[in-house]
Image: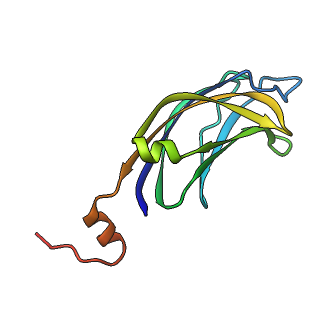
Amino acid sequence: MVRGKLEVLLISAKDLDDSDFFNKMDPYAILTCRSKEQKSTVAKGAGSDPEWNETFFFAVSGNAAVLHVKIMDSDVFSADDLIGEASIPLEAVLLEGSLPPTVHRIVKDEEYSGEIKIALTFTPAEENEEEESYGGWNQST
């Protein structure tokens, strides 16, 4: 069973479908791995080509097979708009340990909505870390 830490570097997006007709979009990302959800900062006024360069960490155990990324447009006076989403398989990074910055398609209603660039790194848990996190003992110093 795989256990460890997944590091996600959310770099940027480009060519996002612009949902704001009067202003530039304020995009942000919601990253979900299994039931854990994290949100990036809002790229205020970044329009269709935002840059984040933010790092997120997820504890991975068992069969965490996919990282889901939703790209949203933050709106002040109405509900935030879904720009699109991507599902990124984690099998390769769990085997290889890291994946360089890679472009993934953002899709909404089966239509292309832009691209997102993400780098992934997986660090396996060491045996004594697993024991400690599951009620094992740790020798005091």
* Picture quadrant of residue 113: top right
The residue at 71%/24% (across/down) is 45
User: Where the C terminus falls, by quadrant?
Assistant: bottom left
The residue at 14%/73% (across/down) is 140
- Above or below residue 98? Residue 21 is above
Q: Is residue 125 left or right of residue 15?
A: left
Residue 120, horizontal then vertical, whole percent: 48, 38
Pick the residue in front: 99 or 77.
99
Residue 72, horizontal then vertical, whole percent: 74, 39
* Picture quadrant of residue 10: top right
Q: Is residue 9 visible?
A: yes
User: Where the N terminus falls, by quadrant?
Assistant: bottom left
Give the residue at the far right of this rendering.
21
Pick the residue in front: 90 or 73.
90
Residue 47, horizontal then vertical, whole percent: 73, 23
The residue at 41%/52% (across/down) is 5
The residue at 78%/23% (across/down) is 24
Q: Is residue 57 left or right of residue 27?
A: left
Q: Is residue 60 left or right of residue 48?
A: left
- Above or below residue 83? Residue 132 is below
Pick the residue in front: 29 or 113.
113
